[in-house]
Image (cartoon, rainbow, N blue to C red):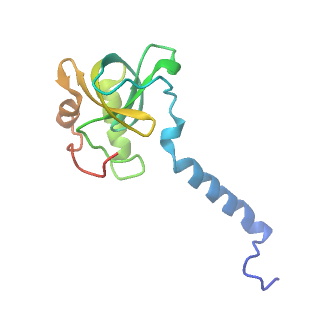
Amino acid sequence: MSTDTTYIGSSMRFPVILTVLVAAVSASPALADPCEGALPAKGTVFSGVVRYVGDGDGLCIGPADRPDRWIEIRLAGFYAPELNEPGGIAAKRRLERVAMGKVLTCRAGRRSYDRVVATCTLGGRPLGSVLRAAGGVEGGRGRPR
């Protein structure tokens, strides 16, 4: 046995490699979304059918079978926990249940990473209000994105 503390025995290589790969994949879940459409300019009103939900406050709208035209949205005025935080999976499921396959009308705000922060309505009601009524997390809390 080597006394060199930097040595990783062959029996330890697989768990170390697996841990690094899992950490790399889970560190950037937003990169896995299929939404590739051009983001609208600030102030633009746009609408479309919800095609993809990434988490409890992020989704994509656009034409069926055209992810290259799906617009990725971070809901303004509504906070949901990240998927890896307590309540994150439930928040995603709630947004899917409330909005998937339905038409949203949105107004583009600022950009955040590769998405637009937008206020959206569902049937004339603010989507954040609909989600809060369905048991969502209150808007305005958590870190800004």
- The residue lying at 17 percent from left, 23 percent from top is 125
Query: Against 65, is 1 above or below?
Result: below
Q: Position of residue 60 (x, y in %)?
A: 41, 26
The quadrant of the image that shows the N terminus is bottom right
Residue at (32%, 16%) from the top-left corner?
47
Q: Where is the C terminus found, in terms of image quarters?
A: top left
Residue in view at x 41 percent, y 46 percent = 83
Q: How many marks?
A: 0
Q: Residue furthest bottom?
A: 3
Of the pair 29 and 98, the residue shown nearer to us: 29
Residue 63, image x, y percentages:
44, 13
Instruction: Please give left or right for residue 10 compared with residue 83 in the image.
Output: right
Q: Position of residue 137 (x, y in %)?
A: 23, 44
Q: Residue at x 72, y 60 (%)?
A: 14
Q: Is residue 8 above or below residue 43?
A: below
Which residue lies most toward the right here? 1
Vertical comparison of 19 with 97: above or below: below
Which quarter of the figure has residue 80?
top left
Q: Nearer the viewer, residue 62 or 40?
A: 40
In the drawing, does residue 30 fall left or right of residue 82? Answer: right
Q: Nearer the viewer, residue 106 or 111?
A: 111
Q: Quadrant of residue 134?
A: top left
* Residue 62 location (% of width, % of height): 42, 17
* Quadrant in the picture for residue 100: top left
